[in-house]
Image (spheres, rainbow, N blue to C red):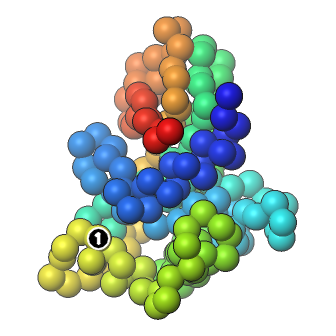
Amino acid sequence: MMTEWEFQDKLTTRWATEGLRIEGRLQFLAAWEVMTPSWRINDSKVYWSEPSIDFLFADECMNLTAVELKRSIRGVKPCWLALSQVTHRVIELFQTISPERLESAYTACWSGNHGRVHRPEYLLTLAEHHRQFFGLASSAKLKQREIRRCVAAFEFGPRCCVTSIISKVMCCRRASVPN
């Protein structure tokens, strides 16, 4: 059985190259393990003393979505706990976000220093990497009107109806992990 950290590691590798579709929209992986309020990256070998969000994605217009990943959510209580967790992180991120902090988190993650991606020969800026990922003619600017929430799990139990609890929450029903 894979641990949540192993699951996150595999998904980071996959989503770094392929992106992720949430509600049919392709998302670019901007950063992972972003802690609030500092925007440092959670790393068990260096620094881990603040709450973090598992993944931070950006769509083609640079609208952000925070994703909290769980191995399984099997009932109403775990569902509410995951929803509360991602909501708390989004509020903290929203209150502290700036283009500089997002760029710093992106650079820390994509530099390869935290082991989930290989160290690139030349690290693009967030804007340039995002532009290339989506094949855009020009770079999109960070949208700070909202940060969307997503609770993702490998398995949702039959008693868990995330979408009926709060319709604004986006829920990835399943994430496939390569063997």
Name, please, the residue furthest toward the top. Answer: 159
**Extreme residue in the left direction:** 137
* Quarter of the rendering containing residue 15: bottom left
**Quick check: 60 above or below 98?**
above
Between 85 and 107, the one lying in front of the other is 107
Q: Position of residue 21 (x, y in %)?
A: 31, 46
**Residue at the image position 55 percent from the left and 49 percent from the top:** 10
Is 128 placed above or below 36 here?
A: below
Q: Quadrant of residue 62?
A: bottom left
Q: How many marks?
A: 1
In the picture, measured across the screen, residue 152 lies left or right of residue 130, that is right
Query: Relative to residue 83, is residue 132 depicted above or below?
Result: below
Percent position (x, y) of residue 83? 57, 34
Instruction: Give left or right: position of 125 versus 55.
Output: left
Q: Position of residue 166 (x, y in %)?
A: 44, 28
Give the position of the N terminus as an image quadrant.
top right
Q: Position of residue 61 (x, y in %)?
A: 26, 67
Q: Residue furthest bottom?
A: 122
Q: Which residue appears at 84% of the width and 66% of the height?
A: 45
Q: Nearer the viewer, residue 73 or 61?
A: 73
The crowding category of the residue bearing disc 1, from other C-alpha atoms within 10 Å (few below 14, some 14 to 19, many at least 20), is some
Report the residue marked by disc 1.
Answer: 133
Q: Residue at x 60, y 52 (%)?
A: 9
Q: Secondary structure at mark 1?
A: helix
Q: In the image, what residue type sits under mark 1?
A: Phe
Taking depth in this image into account, of 41 and 111 the one nearest to the observer is 111
